[in-house]
Image (cartoon, rainbow, N blue to C red):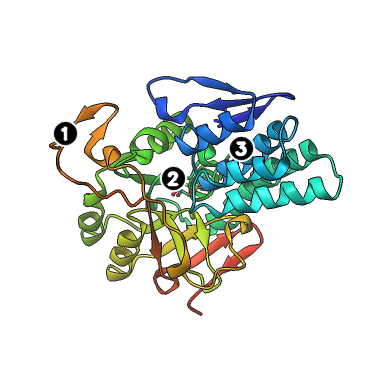
Amino acid sequence: MEVRAFYWEDDHLLLLDQRELPQKEVWLELRDHKAVAKAIKEMAVRGAPAIGCVAAYGFVLGVKKEDPQKVYEVLKSTRPTAYNLFWALDRMMKALKEGRDITEEAISIEREDYEANRRMGEIGSQFIDDGMRVLTHCNTGALATAGWGTALGVIRSAHYSGKRIHVFVNETRPYMQGARLTAWELLKEGIPHTLITDMTAGFLMKKGLIDAVFVGADRITKRGDVANKIGTYTLSVLAKTHNIPFYVVAPTSTFDPNMESGEDVPIEERSEEEVKSFKGCHFSPKETKALHIAFDITPAENITAIITEKGIIYPNR
Ligand SMILES: CSC[C@@H](O)[C@@H](O)C(=O)COP(=O)(O)O
């Protein structure tokens, strides 16, 4: 059965707590916008499109009791980089101001994201040939979206169309979205995969073992620069050096129409504890300072193509 990150249940939101995966499948019952904001901030739910969908439902829950502008601000301040969050909240505010049914609006945001993912899967699988070995970073699957996935959705579509593929999964330090979430999704789907440390990618490319790289995006600027999980930029440089195609897969709701260049994208910095420890297990001296930059910018020049639900963009043609 297809993985789902959340379900809207009329008066509350059910959310799969991704911090507990893959060991446990724990569902959180969220009944107000503050609980939704906390879940986004603390990464019980993550991935740009999923954050947008969940924030929209948080808005529905919040405006039942509180001033809409306050609800909007609380949800907006959770994570700074993923553009889908702002896109979804602006859309919800507009629907409210126009007197439309906001629950229906949130349901539409979720449905449209799912449909966009299915369409990107169809469009993007033309870049995957039978027998290909592809590399992916972070988690861009059903857990990061309303379902199916962006980059992982393309891989899923290629698999369902009968192509044999092998996926190399970057573990994605320090939050381990690749090791914990992507590996879990691929295992559930029966898609052959191998988990690697982030540092292994370059050597595999050098040995000719990677045919293409597929990643998602948190924000795409007007010139085609892409903000995505830290390590994406490094992969793009490696791919360019080794002449390997580098594909970004994202719905148009990830495109920021007001941002010219990657230089302007707000980049989230998270707690240094997440670099020095994992689930309470410290592996660095407590006194050592750590830097936790959660996203980086891949310049348009390093990207072969951006696959959207509306078609393909070739930023360098
Ligand atoms: C479809 S997901 C695209 C991105 O949101 C994904 O690649 C990513 O970087 C997620 O980061 P996260 O910090 O886990 O929210």
Q: Which residue is painted at 77% across and 42% down in the image?
A: 105
Judged left or right of residue 47, residue 273 is left
- Kindly identify which numbered label has been placed on residue 283: 1
Q: Would residue 304 be seen by someone viewing this image from the given angle?
A: no
- Cα distance, mark 1 to mark 2? 39 Å
- Outermost residue, bottom side: 317
Viewer-closest of 13 and 210: 13
Callout 3: 10 Å neighbours few (<14), some, many (20+)?
Answer: many
The residue carrying mark 2 is 164
Q: Is residue 135 above or below residue 274?
A: below
Q: Secondary structure at mark 3?
A: helix
Residue 4 location, quadrant? top right
Residue 39 picture location, percent across and down: 51, 32
Which residue occupies the foreground of this view, 115 or 281?
281
Alpha carbon of mark 2 to alpha carbon of mark 3: how far?
34 Å
Q: Earlier in the sequence, mark 1 or mark 3?
A: 3
